[in-house]
Structure formats: structure tokens, C-alpha cells
Image (cartoon, helix red, strand yellow):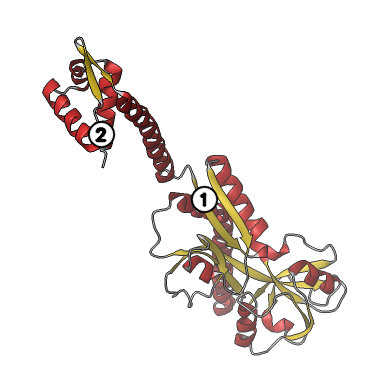
Amino acid sequence: MLDRRRMQLLRAVVTSGSVTAAARNLGYTPSAVSQQMAVLEKEAGIALLERTGRGVRPTEAGRVLTDYAAVIDRHFTEAETELAELRAGRTGRVAVRYFATAGATLVAPAVAALRREQPGVQVELKLSDPRDPLPEVRNRLADVALVVRPRDQLAADGIRFVHLLDDRYSAVLPEGHRLAAKRELDLTDLADEPWVGSDQPGPCLEPVLDACGSAGFSPNFVVESGDYDTAQGFVAAGLGISLIPEMGLGNRHPAVVVRPVRNPEPIRTIYAAVRDPSPAQPAVHRLLDALRNTTAPHRAEQSAEHSARQAAKRGAEHRDEHGAEY
């Protein structure tokens, strides 16, 4: 088998015109270069150099091998460069699966930011089955899948979950509804209302059903819709009320009002699912960083609102306890 390093040494000898010149350029002794050329000729099974005066010139076999050495060296350099780009996350391919409402709100800005920073990274986007895209990640058909997952169900063989966002549900009411005058609703306020279903059975409906169960009732769904925009249309027409997550309210219908819900507040938690243990794929890490950066303002806003609510709640409890002092 031909040795690549000896082929490059042959190329240096042919280019320099002599063993002595090649040895001087490379920092070797002439005898060491001669020995390596002798070994290479044995590997090739044919003479590669012939003497000419004080120098050497390649035989036909030597010329062919020298040409291939140049090609191999170029490809080797290109391979090293491409690997360096992959290690740095400047190139690569990332296959992403996402559900509908995450597309415009999370995926689009994250991918746009990634392309601005690393245009060499290719991102394959595909709308996934909202029920369970995890098998695609586990079977290496996808690198990242955006999923809705309860916090107590984060154990999945071969999958690691990266928290992105807590998406809170709000009550959507038709204009003029008797509850529209309230700034905030208790979930029990909606117990006797007709409901417009905005989700199919699955991880996005479960937080609503669980919250209603905790409040002591089951919602009375009178209309089923396949998406949040359609649900808002049904609500605007007066067919019922609905609970819709914040990410689903991007195209708000002009004839509805939206109110926060408490006691309890339904929340769906959104994660990026990746393989675990995952191989070192810098491009995947770059995309995860972009997703986290996209959701950072939402997390900060939610944290501030939560702190404000807790402060208001403590103030109300203090006033109730020490009302006589005021």
C-alpha cells in the first residue's frame, strides 16, 4: 500500500529537482530522503526516479505518482478545512421537526438568526406529527424536534429535552361577553360556558383538561376546530369561549377579547428534543442557542409578570390579615 507521506516526499524531490535540495527544504538529511524514496519504489513495484547529472527526474511512473500526490494533498487540505468548519459550527446540516404554532414564533426567527451568523449551516425544516416526533430523533431521521411535554414526563430513552418556553393559555371571549369586563378570570368562571376546542387530543390539550380537572370541572366542548385561528372565529361568532396559548394568539381576531386565567393557570411547556448522548454536532448546538435566544425575551417577561403577581398576591394577603391597620 502506498504511503501518503512518502508520496508527498516524492513530490518534493521532483519539484526541487534533486534529493539534496528536497532534504534541505524539508529539514531532512539526504540519506533519510533517499531511504524513503527506496521504500516508496518497493511499495510501487516500479522505478520512480532516474539520475540526470547532479539531480533526478521522474520516470513515467514517478510523474504519475507525483501528479496524484498533488491531487491527494489538495483533497486532504480541503478535508481538513471542511472538518474545521464543521467543528466550529460554520457548516453542517440540521434536520428540524416542529409543530405549527412553533413555526412562526420560534423556528422562523431562530433559523433566520442562524443563517445570518452562519450561512454555511443548512437547516431542513419539516412540519411534524404533533403527537410524537421523538422516534424521528431517536432513529436519526431528525436532529432536533420541538415538542410539548409535561415536566413530569421528561424521561425518554435516548432523548434529552432542552427547555425553551412556558406557553400560558388565556381565555378568549367574544366581544360583549359577560366576563369580558373582568381583567383576570378564575378558571372556574368558565366552568358553565360552552367551549370551543382549539386542539386535537394530545399534549397541547392535556394542560387544559388537567387544569380544568384541578378546578373541579370538565369543559363542555360544543365545537371542535383544527387550529387556533378557526377557534377564534368560532368564539367571535358567539359559539363559545376557548383557551388558547400565547403562541396561538399571533393573528388575533378583531372581535374577541383575551383575558389571563388563574387558579390554576394552564401552561404548556415547550422543549427542543435531541438525541442523548448526542454526538458533537456544533451546528445543532448553534441552532439550540438560536432557539434559546429567541425565547429569552419571553422567559424574561414571564419571570417579571410572575414576580409582579406574587407581589400583588402577598400585598392582598397582608391587607386581608392587617386590614384594621389601614
As rendered, which of 313 and 126 lies closer to the eye? 126
- Sequence-first tag of 1 and 2: 2
Q: Within the image, what quadrant is residue 193 found in?
A: bottom right
Seen in the image, is 183 located left or right of residue 88?
right
Compared to residue 140, the image places residue 60 above or below, namely: above
**Circle 2 sits on which residue?**
5
Who's the residue at 82% across and 77% down the image? 178
Give how far across and how far down residue 125 sits, in percent. 61, 56
Kind of residue indicated by mark 1: Arg
From the image, tell me which residue sits under label 1. 93
Q: Residue at x 62, y 50 (%)?
A: 109
- The answer to whether 212 appears left or right of 25 in the picture is right
At which x and y percent is residue 279? 39, 57
Please say whether residue 263 is visible from this viewpoint. no
User: Which quarter of the figure is the N terminus placed in?
Assistant: top left
Q: Pointer 1 and pointer 2: residues touching (CB < 8 Å)?
A: no
**Position of 120 relative to 62 (above/below):** below
Query: Residue 97: percent from the left, percent from the top?
Result: 58, 62
